[in-house]
Image (cartoon, rainbow, N blue to C red):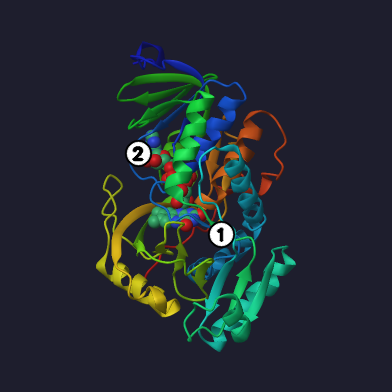
Amino acid sequence: MSQRAAISHKTVPEIEIVVIGGGVVGSCLATFLAEEGMEVACIDDQHHSGSTTNAGSLHVQMQSRNIRLSPQLMPQLEKALPLYPRAVSAWKELAARTDLDIELTINGGLMVAETDDQFNFLSEKCARELELGLRVEMLDRIQVERTAPYLGKSIVGAELCADEGKVNPLLANTAIKKLAVEAGVHFLKRLRVDAINIDDDQIYLETLQGQIRTSKLAIAAGAGAGRLADQIGIHVPTLAEPLHMNVTEPAASIIPHLLQHAEKSITMKQLAAGNVVIGGGWPAKLSGPEEYPTVRMKSLVGNLQLAGAIVPAIESLQLIRTWAGVNSITDGRSILGSSKTNSNIFFALPGDAGYTLGPLCARLVADTIQNRIPEISLSDYSPDRFSGNYHRMDREEN
Ligand SMILES: Cc1cc2nc3c(=O)[nH]c(=O)nc-3n(C[C@H](O)[C@H](O)[C@H](O)COP(=O)(O)OP(=O)(O)OC[C@H]3O[C@@H](n4cnc5c(N)ncnc54)[C@H](O)[C@@H]3O)c2cc1C
């Protein structure tokens, strides 16, 4: 069947640009483009969304988990570092633009050490991050007691990164969707793009509800992006990483910081309502690409035990919810902008700590689509880097 003979989508048969993926990146990107007058459709199958399952930590310093699991990726992780402080600023800009409170708080992040080896590891990391321009410093035990008296006695020191913080992702997602709707984005929800066909300068997207024709396409499809890119002859490796999350009942305010550990997988923070959100990369189960992720008891228990060792005051709290979500990993760096293969197809994949990077990545790609020079050069983040040998992030094996 020729492209033109296919049945067209009823409400959006053709449109100026389509964004595939309605997570934090796709929704922000669609919003920014629509605010500049473009006719935008955002298609999302709501199948594996990291953005609706994530923890809302705003990361800036390098996560020890990535260094431990993928040491071969240090150069990639270091290249990605300049994006993170700027990404936190992008969240501040977003928070200032919405009339909803997204509970954005930047109280700093502590990566804690329990042994001298871990402290030395953090000291080296801190020195390197200072060289690379991050606002980080080491705290010894006495300084830790002053800064974070709620931490357990086993903590011998910590690396403090002043720019780290948190948002409430449920509120932030709602705020972004509201901005998108106000800007006039056409959301096509629970709809999957099954195939992409290209005919001259036109792009045809095949869906169960019919074909959509466009001349520009942005792929912000998280872990689903690699499969879409393959169809148009572009190699963009994305891996679905199922991750575990826990959240406690509300408690009095205990933890102002974002907490991580020098060697063990954990992130911990407290929401405005008092719930303690605990995650940080413990694995969940994903039986196949069409399945939904499910929790692992080992992760549930291990994650909570570690949290209690770091902040003893939370040990008496009840767990009220546990869930699994799908993270999307690449080679440790964002994949942003168009490929040499087709200058009308743009990638907007944040890579590691993608919720933190979401609004910034969307802004950088929106600038590129609008033929503006983005504030950060995208040359280090090009999709064209995946020819020949490449290294991808590895999975957690707790
Ligand atoms: C449990 C968990 C906790 C996390 N915690 C944090 C954190 O605290 N801080 C942080 O910075 N990051 C965190 N992350 C990572 C972060 O959530 C993701 O990197 C980020 O949300 C990715 O956003 P995105 O918009 O690129 O992709 P997603 O939010 O994954 O959205 C992509 C969307 O595209 C859809 N899609 C894919 N293929 C198609 C198709 N063919 N047709 C239509 N739709 C399609 C998907 O179903 C999905 O809805 C966490 C991830 C998980 C899983």
| Number of other residues with Cα within 10 Å of mark 2, as a class: few under 14, some 14 to 19, many 20 or more | some
- Disc tally is 2
* Discs 2/1, front: 1
Q: Is residue 172 visible?
A: yes
Q: Pick the residue in front: 142 or 189.
A: 142
Q: Which residue corresponds to the image point at 60% horizontal and 21% vertical from the top-left?
A: 37
Q: Pick the residue in front: 214 or 159.
A: 159
User: Spatial distance from mark 2 to mark 1, Cα to Cα?
Assistant: 27 Å
Answer with left or right where residue 351 lies relative to residue 10. right
| Number of other residues with Cα within 10 Å of mark 1, as a class: few under 14, some 14 to 19, many 20 or more | many
The residue that label 2 is drawn on is 46
The residue that label 1 is drawn on is 165
Q: Pick the residue in front: 165 or 292.
A: 165
Image-quadrant location for residue 213: top left
Q: Is residue 127 above or below residue 359?
A: below
Q: Earlier in the sequence, mark 2 or mark 1?
A: 2
Residue extending furthest top? 5
* Horizontal and vertical percent position of residue 292: 27, 49
Q: Is residue 343 visible?
A: no
The answer to whether mark 2 is within 8 Å of ligand 1 is yes
Residue extending furthest front? 252
* Horizontal and vertical percent position of residue 76: 60, 59
Q: Helix or strand or loop: what does disc 1 sit on?
A: strand
* Horizontal and vertical percent position of residue 338: 59, 36
The answer to whether mark 1 is within 8 Å of ligand 1 is no
At label 1, the amino acid type is: Gly
* Horizontal and vertical percent position of residue 245: 36, 60
